[in-house]
Amino acid sequence: MEKKTGKLRKILILLMALMALGLLAGCSGSQPTEAVEEKYIPVEVEVASKKTLINTAILSGKISSETDVSVVPKIPGKVEFVNVKVGDAVHKGEVLFTLETTDMNNNYQLAEARYQTSKDQWEAAKTSLERTKVLAAEKIANAQKTLANTKALFDAGAASKVQLDQAELGLKELESSFAGQIEQLSVQASDSSLKLAEVQLTQAREALDNATVTAPVDGVVSQVNVQVGNMASSAQAAIGLTNSSTLYSSLSVAENLVNRLKKDQVVKVTVPSASEKSFVGTIDYISPASDPQTRLYPVKITLDNPEGLIKPGMFAKVELATDEKADVMAVKSEAVVLKNEKTIVYVVQDDKAVSKEVTTGLDTGVDIEIVKGLAQGDKVIIKGQTLVDEGHKVKVVGGEES
């Protein structure tokens, strides 16, 4: 009996042990297994593609007007009336100011009287000359006829030598007398004095005309230096005009840039004090010779100013395209790294970084030409490229694949 009881106890203990082991195994099977993720490097990429690359140089210049005109009177005089003020828009031929004309009118009237007198005297002398010439011709012809008759009589013995000498002397005296009269009348009939009077009249008329000072060009009044009652002369500009519709900026470029520029080339111009937007300019002139002092080449940039925002005297930044390549393979400049004396870029293939040795060309500072080593469509790492190495696992988190 005791043997049976002992065996039963052993069986119960064994069953309890097995149950305990089962419970432990069940509990351990219900706990999740901790996953271990593989490490990667986050990167940004750009797909290699064809681009147009433009290398630029930015230079500063001062804005000037194509038509900065200083208006001075052609004659000095006292200002009678000023018709404009600073800021007024004027057209060519519009009156700017006038000078007093009292003395000028008096001078003109005197000059006109002198001219009329000279003209009358010239016409009278001319008439007298013609009449004297006709009279002289008649009288000399008669004297010549008398001399011929007297000589015939002398040859026939019917006239004395005294009579012949008197006839010859009479002809000579008559010719000499009329020659003197004609010479004197010719001087009086010449138009030299009349021309002098005519010049004086023209000058007097021009003085009157110049007393009214008009705008030589279209423009805007930039300065007024005359006042009513003050004297105006050519010593100082009376009125300043400027035309702000067409302006220009003068630049000076170095010898390594001048041959990269072309006449009529379009450029980008920014004038910070006028507008945040850029303006379109055109290369109007490139000097064939450098300035002897600076050794730089002057370049003139013209630009339109239809809204009148740009004013002469403002400073401008001109962006000149010095190199341009169209339809070339290019990526961001920072994608290219130098490693082991090789120029490489990293591309993403099968979620891994793969290095490719490349040959580069034009670098604009933003994009760089890839002459050899990349294919169109390659996913080039542009951020994180300095952290990866060949075969590193990467994950695209930005750029064109984000």
Image (cartoon, grey):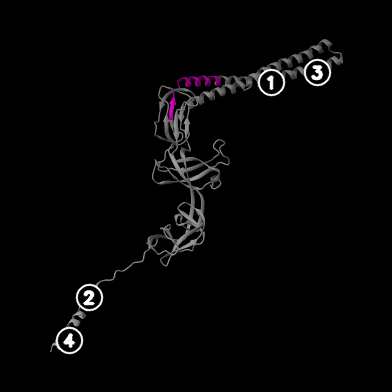
- The type of residue carrying mark 2 is Leu
Which is closer to the viewer, label 4 or label 1?
4
Q: Is residue 21 left or right of 355 when viewed as pictured?
A: left
Quadrant, the C terminus:
bottom left
Above or below, 365 relative to 313: below
Which stretch is magenta? 96-115
x, y percent for residue 178: 71, 17
Local crowd size for mark 1, using a 10 Å CA cut-off: few (<14), some (14–19), many (≥20): some
Which is closer to the viewer, label 3 or label 1?
1
Disc 4 target residue = 7
Q: Are marks 4 and 1 in contact (CB under 8 Å)?
A: no
Local crowd size for mark 2, using a 10 Å CA cut-off: few (<14), some (14–19), many (≥20): few
x, y percent for residue 331: 46, 58
Question: In the image, what residue occupies the spot 62% across and 22% down?
Answer: 192
Q: Judge whether residue 160 can be spotted in this image.
A: no
Disc 2 target residue = 24
Upstream in the sequence, badge 1 or badge 2?
A: 2
Upstream in the sequence, badge 3 or badge 2?
A: 2
Question: In the image, what residue occupies the spot 51% across and 62% down?
Answer: 373
Towards the viewer: 90 or 225: 225
Upstream in the sequence, badge 3 or badge 1?
A: 1
Question: In the image, what residue occupies the spot 81% across and 12% down?
Answer: 165
Quadrant, the N terminus:
bottom left
Disc 1 target residue = 133
Disc 3 target residue = 148
- The type of residue carrying mark 4 is Lys
Distance from the alpha carbon under mark 4 to that under mark 3: 205 Å
Upstream in the sequence, badge 4 or badge 3?
A: 4
Point out which mark residue 65 bears. Answer: none
SS assignment at label 2: helix
